[in-house]
Amino acid sequence: MMVWGGIAAFTSLRVLAQTESTTQRSGELNLRQGVTDISGQVYDLHMLMFSICVVIAVLVFGVMFYSIIRHRKSRGVKPAHFHENIKVEIAWTIIPFLILVFMAVPAAKTLIAMEDVSEPDMTVLVTGSQWKWHYQYMNSDVSFYSVMATQREQITNKFTKGENYLLEVDRPLVIPTGQKVRFLITSDDVIHSWWVPDFAIKKDANPGFINEVWTNVNEPGIYRGQCAELCGKDHGFMPVVVIAKTPDEYNAWMTEQESRVKQAKAEEQRLLAMSMSMDELMTLGEKVYNSTCAACHMPTGQGLPGVFPALKGSPMVLQDQQAHIEIVLNGKAGTAMQAFGKMLSLKDIAAVVTYERNAWGNNTGDIIQPKDVNAVATGTGI
């Protein structure tokens, strides 16, 4: 029963995510077949269980309604009186037992296959954060955050909602087709859940723990999902987008990404030796603030009373420059303030801290340079 219960819980999920894959049809009501062998097994198992349930329902309700109609009181039928019929007791014990065994065997086989993460061709570390995903390719230096790209104007009904409303990101995860990809799934803060219906993957991301799951995508395409665990106020704005490319296309993409990482590291070193003007920092800082901070602290910097602190007039922002940089870099444990050290560059952090210390009437006149952020990050002080 526990084995069947696990599969039943999976198959009962509403299919909320949309995908460009050929398996998705407009108005689809049934479980989708997906694009992996495992998702195909889950679909076949779902249809087997559904068929068994339909047959049982037809037989049980058929006998029930036949008995009600055929032996109704208006026909003068006298009810039979009998107790402790051993044959009936044995029948209604043995038959359900055999049905459950018949259901449990294929369910257990499918669950065992879903949990077999041995001998992967590549591994990706997936980390959930409020409210975005971080992907780290374990065999390279490539890593990045994937953040929802749907415009706020669509959410507030100022613009027409797009085809993939709430299911589009700035940087999708890219994996190769025809290869076994293992995902190590964890969280930086609260419990999230990484869910891609076309892969038959739904695995919780628990802080302090690592869960494993895998996929082997047969068809190139774009596959969409989302966080399936209530994780905070922006839970509904945490989509997953995976692009499956052919091995040759994937290798070309990975080469390009590794080149970008090298260029970014070289740029970071260059920035440590340069000084940006107040105008440059404020322009960039406003852009970074609106894309990463405004959702919580509000575009006006006034925050949400009792939920997110105001930056306008904040003692830390006005007085403690090092603490300001540290909290942007490392976040604050036990609060919704997350760490942006892995998400933003030294230049971006310098710009947004400068902006926050000089916007909305704060006017401290402080100019934070990338070298100042690097000094705090490395523990050498400003």
Image (spheres, helix red, strand yellow):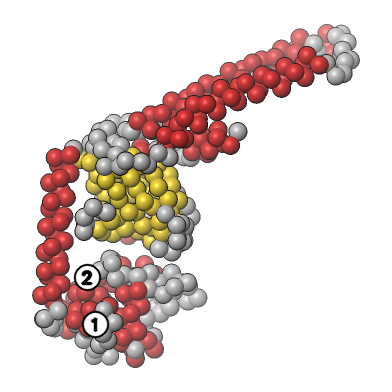
Q: Is residue 240 above or below residue 300?
A: above
Q: Quadrant of residue 358?
A: bottom left
N-terminal-most mark, 1 or 2:
2
Q: Secondary structure at mark 2?
A: loop
Q: Quadrant of residue 295?
A: bottom left
Res 374 seen here: yes
Residue positioned 70% across, 14% down in the render: 63
Q: Is residue 183 above or below residue 8?
A: below
Q: How many residues crowd mark 1 within 10 Å: few (<14), some (14–19), many (20+)?
A: some
Q: How far across and how far down the image is residue 33, in percent?
A: 38, 30
Residue positioned 72% across, 16% down in the render: 91
Q: Nearer the viewer, residue 312 or 40?
A: 40
Q: Nearer the viewer, residue 74 or 276?
A: 276
Circles 1, 2 touching at the beta carbon (< 8 Å)? no
Q: How far across and how far down the image is residue 191, in percent?
A: 47, 57
Residue type (three-letter) at the residue carrying disc 2: Ser
Is 231 situated left or right of 320 in this image? Answer: right
Please give the residue where the numbered disc 2 appears in the rendered image.
345
Is 307 situated left or right of 314 in this image? Answer: right
Between disc 1 and disc 2, the foreground one is 1
Residue type (three-letter) at the residue carrying disc 1: Ala
Q: Quadrant of residue 52?
A: top right
Residue 375 marker? 1
Q: How far across and how far down the image is residue 189, in percent?
A: 43, 64
